Image (spheres, helix red, strand yellow):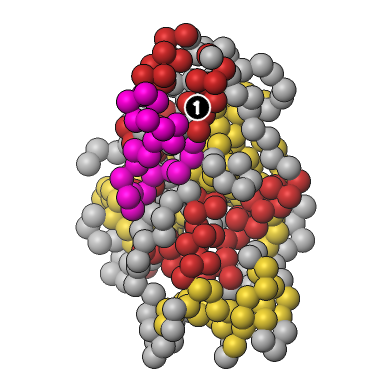
Amino acid sequence: MEEKLKKAYDRMTMPAAVSARIEGTLKKKRGKGWQYRYLRPAPRRRALPRILAAACFALVLAAGTAALTLRPAGSLAPSETAATEEAPPFSLTEDDLELLRKMCFYMPDWQGYENLDADFWRQFLFASFTCPESLTDTTARTILGELPYQSGAVLLSREQAEDYVKEFLGVDLPEFPAGGAEDSTNLNFFDGCYHIHLSDFGDVDYRYLGTEILSDEYGMDYLDVTFGGFLGGDGEASWLVDFTIGPGDTQRGFLIVGKTTRSLEPSFAGDYAADDTGEIGLEIREKGDGTFQLRLNVYRVTTLEGEGRLEGGVLSFSSRDGEEGTVTLEGDTALVTITSPGWPDGIRSYRYTRTTGSPEAPAPAQ
């Protein structure tokens, strides 16, 4: 009888409260530091007491069915089945890894189901179908197989888009602005189809690097699957892509529940001393959203505080007073250039030498 109850519990849809707890945990996991373990065959913790079976039995009797559906219609919560502690860890096949490699191109970064907004859906659908594997005069071969192709655009029906989203993310595709027939954007919706114009991803490649098991604070396991991003003929990865993968009631048995891209460029965070005085003249702190806070002390001139963003190896910043500039790194030497038009020409460039790297000290005062 107990085994039957466990199987019934396995088929139950995850309660909304549990789903909300997982969403909150996933949103905070990068900041709180999850426990990582190398992926290897290992027995799961057996923490399913008999009282859980009794509770499940009561639920089944109360509902009169083993397929209770507690998730509100249309909510952005995973449509996965509840996992028990006695279930073995799910695994990914070579085909699964190839699909995730394609998602490196197709899927924008996201953490937390509440962040799946209209901009995410436009980017996701456009990137997924803008670069077909092959083309004929009337068809395009895509991740969903053959789709109609006409007037320079791949045609994806609303129903196909909904099934695609459900299979990989486990959520319902909401209505979102996508333009009409008269618009000239890369993605339009009319006549019941998304019309996705063609483009390419440039000379970029992704390679699978490894998988680890993630354990959250509640003891729930996920997979962290990492790919390296390679530009042109570079022999070393320039960035990393991490997928958080959870079990799901889908054809492949898993859902993507988060994606994060991390640059492998040298870290700019640190304290830097001025070459002329030896005193700290530049402080750079990396924020959780990938931007930077800077404090620049130009000796006998002024102190600038502001924010910056790293792109292509150059940290561009703007101060609260409206001054703008850039920071580049040569080893442990930071070259700061003020680019504001009103800045005196003779003192636009400054050199600082790193004294600490990636400090834990608080960012500059607000």
Q: Is residue 105 left or right of residue 48?
A: right
Q: In the orientation shown, which residue stands out farthest toward the top?
A: 50
Residues drawn in magenta: 59-81
Q: Is residue 306 left or right of residue 67?
A: left
On the image, the x and y values in percent for residue 27 come to 39, 38
Q: Is residue 357 visible?
A: no
Q: Is residue 94 left or right of residue 63?
A: right
Prevailing secondary structure of the magenta residues? loop
Q: Residue at x 53, y 67 (%)?
A: 160
Observer-nearest residue: 154 or 235? Answer: 154
Is 139 placed above or below 338 here? Answer: below
Kind of residue sitting beneath label 1: Ala
Q: Is residue 173 visible?
A: yes
Q: Please give the residue where the numbered disc 1 appears in the rendered image.
A: 8
Q: Residue at x 48, y 48 (%)?
A: 170
**Any magenta on residue 78?**
yes
Is 91 placed above or below 4 here? Answer: below
On the image, the x and y values in percent for residue 171 come to 43, 51
Image quadrant where residue 87 sits: top right
On the image, the x and y values in percent for residue 268 come to 49, 44
**Any magenta on residue 325?**
no
Query: Is label 1 in a helix, a strand or a loop?
Result: helix
Is 52 placed above or below 104 here? Answer: above
The mark tally for this picture is 1
On the image, the x and y values in percent for residue 224 come to 59, 36
Q: Residue at x 42, y 9 (%)?
A: 51
* Label 1 packing within 10 angstroms: few (<14), some (14-19), many (20+): some
Is 224 placed above or below 259 here? Answer: above
The C terminus: image quadrant: top left
